[in-house]
């Protein structure tokens, strides 16, 4: 599955937060297998909002320019996912792998 082509729907950060509150999941897709340089892991990850029915929306920098928001470091990705309210962050480390996050009911 090519998520960049198969996910024509997009979502802003505010929209993602709203959808997460409605039971959607936050899926992290590894687009480039990360490499370690000194104490930092660098790769490319994108974030997708997945509805319970399977519909996916790609996180973009702003809805008006429709550019995929890419995270290039594990630190940046972890900070973003944690800011969404997740207390456990799973990061795929191989191109094409996905880690799904869903808010717990007590969050």
Image (tube, rainbow, N blue to C red):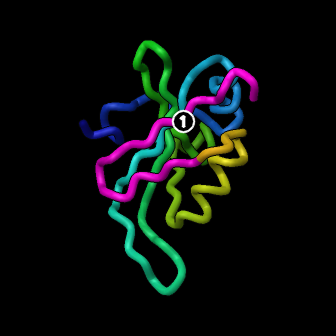
- In the rendered image of this protein, does residue 24 appear above or below residue 49? above
Q: Quadrant of residue 56?
A: top left
Quarter of the image containing the C terminus? Answer: top right
Q: Is 47 situated above or below 23?
A: below
Report the label total.
1
The residue carrying mark 1 is 101
Inspect the magenta stretch and tell me whether residue 93 lies in it. Answer: yes
State the residue in front, 60 or 82: 82
Residue 10: x percent and y percent?
Answer: 51, 32
Residue at figure coordinates x 35%, y 54% from the top left: 31
**Magenta extent:** 89-107
Location of the N terminus (image quadrant): top left
Name the outermost residue toward the right. 107
Q: Main secondary structure of the magenta part?
A: loop
Residue lying farthest to the bottom in this orientation = 38
Q: Quadrant of residue 104?
A: top right
Q: Is 105 placed left or right of 60 in the picture?
A: right
In the structure shown, which secondary structural element does the residue marked by tag 1 occupy? strand
């Amino acid at each position: 599955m090519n998520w960049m082509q198969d996910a024509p729907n997009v979502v802003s950060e505010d929209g993602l937060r709203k959808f997460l509150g409605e039971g959607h999941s936050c899926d992290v897709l590894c687009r480039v297998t990360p490499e370690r340089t000194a104490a930092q892991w660098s790769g490319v990850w994108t974030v997708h909002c997945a509805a319970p029915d399977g519909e996916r929306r790609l996180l973009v920098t702003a809805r008006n320019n429709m550019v995929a928001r890419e995270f290039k470091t594990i630190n940046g990705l972890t900070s973003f996912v944690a800011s969404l309210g997740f207390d456990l962050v799973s990061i795929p480390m191989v191109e094409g792998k996905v880690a799904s996050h869903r808010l717990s009911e007590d969050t």
